[in-house]
Image: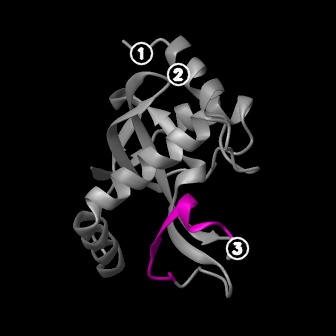
């Protein structure tokens, strides 16, 4: 796992078919490789979010310490409900050069196994039809990603 950013070209294409895809360009995401979904191992990016609603179930996010942008009553963390499929072609390096970013990277690194297990559990629930109302449409996004010319 590593912290990356998803290229705006992919986000723009995804936003055309799914309004739940987060649109902030250069948003840090956690790249999680080799999660199983729909019978196939895939690569996913889980976005860092400053304002996950306070009543979101714990199964939908991995908590991190609040950021200055985190509003009262909301949570900061990795938001599984906004997960998107990716390929290496659409990834960019994300600079982890501030003390806050280093703190989050350290927490993620120390909890790698937990995050992978929680992401996989989220995908399994999603596949079984337990989809949060504001989640990304993974099947549509995967179909779009597979149709894109990625050579």
Residue lying at 63% horizontally and 50% vertically, measured from the top left = 22
Element at label 2: helix
Q: Position of residue 135 (x, y in %)?
A: 67, 47
Q: Marks 3 and 2, Cα distance to the nearest angstrom? A: 31 Å
Q: Position of residue 11 (x, y in %)?
A: 58, 38
Q: Which residue is mark 2?
A: 145
Question: Nearer the observer, disc 2 or disc 1?
Answer: 2
Left or right: residue 28 versus residue 10 is: left
120 and 139: which one is in front?
A: 120
Q: Marks 3 and 1, Cα distance to the nearest angstrom? A: 38 Å
Question: Nearer the observer, disc 3 or disc 2?
Answer: 3
79 and 59: which one is in front?
A: 59
Q: In the image, is residue 98 above or below residue 6? A: below
Query: Between disc 2 and disc 1, whose residue precedes?
Result: 2
Q: Position of residue 95 (x, y in %)?
A: 30, 60
The 10 Å Cα crowd at callout 3, few under 14, some 14 to 19, many 20 or more, is few
Element at label 1: loop
Q: Which residue is mark 1?
A: 150
The 10 Å Cα crowd at callout 1, few under 14, some 14 to 19, many 20 or more, is few
User: How many discs appear?
Assistant: 3
Q: In the image, is residue 133 above or below residue 124? A: below
Element at label 3: loop
Answer whether residue 129 is magenta in the image. Answer: no
Q: What stretch of residues is rendered in magenta?
A: 56-67
The 10 Å Cα crowd at callout 2, few under 14, some 14 to 19, many 20 or more, is some
Q: Which residue is mark 3?
A: 55
């Amino acid at each position: 796992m590593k912290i990356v950013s998803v290229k705006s070209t992919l986000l723009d294409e995804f936003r055309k078919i799914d309004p739940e895809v987060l649109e902030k360009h250069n948003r840090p995401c956690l790249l999680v490789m080799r999660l199983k979904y729909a019978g196939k191992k895939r690569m996913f990016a889980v976005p860092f979010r400053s304002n996950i609603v306070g009543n979101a179930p714990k199964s939908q996010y991995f908590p991190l310490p609040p950021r200055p942008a985190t509003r009262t009553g909301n949570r900061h963390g990795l938001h599984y409900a906004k997960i998107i499929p990716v390929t290496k072609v659409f990834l960019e390096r994300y600079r982890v050069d501030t003390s806050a970013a280093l703190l989050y990277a350290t927490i993620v690194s120390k909890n790698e196994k937990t995050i992978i297990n929680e992401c996989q559990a989220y995908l399994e629930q999603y596949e079984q039809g337990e989809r949060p109302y504001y989640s990304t449409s993974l099947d549509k996004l995967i179909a779009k990603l597979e149709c894109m010319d990625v050579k």
